[in-house]
Image (tube, rainbow, N blue to C red):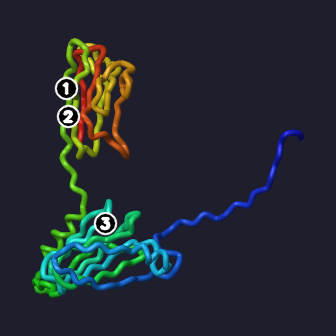
Amino acid sequence: MSGQTSGIYNASKVGVSNGLPPSMPQIYSLSVNLIGAAQTLDFKSLANLHRLQNVQGIFIDNSAGAVTCTVSTVGGPTLQIPASYQGLFPLYLGADNTVTLNGYGQINLSLLNFPTPAAIWPTAAQIVTLNGTSAVQDVAAEGYLSNLQPTLTAISSGSVTSPATPASTQLFAANPARKYMLIQSAYNVAGAVFHDLWINPIGGTASVGGLDCVKIAAGTYYESRAYVSGAQINYYDAAGGNNITALQQ
């Protein structure tokens, strides 16, 4: 038929990754002698020379170090390894492919291109006895590992009664550490009915249909997902005098 074309396409298999590199697992090791000043290691050449790609983990040996060693990457967590300890951690190298070390003494590092768990242990294990059975226990190591876990603050309430005379009103003060937010539309207890609510999530004036304003329709609620604003949150209830339920973390 005129003006139409057709074709036959070959479908390709889509693989599911298990995190392992297509090549064999590889390890790149080196030693750094720290004298108290931070040192930044640039690993760009590793990928350029195909010596180690897709770094996913790091082994840190501070058994010969005199103080706690810190290892950090741009945009990533800061790892802490006490003197006389070793550790294994997941690691993501940022776009600059650099790792910054701080400490004192000889530090041994190994970069790994396969998934690794987080673990830390002393070079001289502490032995305790549990019901007659020997077991290795190290409270300090557990403390350093706990630093890798996210810290969640309790959910706090910002619930209020909206002004009888409608106006743009602060619901939450600015909170750069805010991780979660839920706001329900306005509710009139006496009439048992919901009303529309307008919020401005970036700190500006809230109004009906105003710039940067978001409508929470009657009987619905807004709940943050992947992103939540850390700015001051203002609201506008055109009906006035209603309950506003709001939670943040």
Q: Distance between the residues labelled 1 and 2?
A: 13 Å
**Residue 96 location (% of width, % of height):** 39, 65
For marks 1 and 3 on the same chain, the one whose residue lies earlier in the sequence: 3
> Which residue position holds label 3?
73
Q: How far apart are marks 1 and 3 (CA)?
A: 43 Å
- Foreground mark, 1 or 3, reads 3
For marks 2 and 3 on the same chain, the one whose residue lies earlier in the sequence: 3
Disc 3 residue type (three-letter): Thr
- Foreground mark, 1 or 2, reads 2
Q: Quadrant of the C terminus?
A: top left
- Foreground mark, 2 or 3, reads 3
Q: Residues within 10 Å of mark 1 (few under 14, many from 20)?
A: some
Q: Is residue 127 visible?
A: yes
**Residue appearing at x 19%, y 48% in the figure:** 153
Q: Quadrant of the N terminus?
A: top right
Disc 2 residue type (three-letter): Ala
Disc 1 residue type (three-letter): Val
Secondary structure beneath disc 2?
A: loop
Secondary structure beneath disc 1?
A: strand
Q: How crowded is mark 2: few (under 14 residues within 10 Å), some or many (20 or more)?
A: few
> Which residue position holds label 1?
160
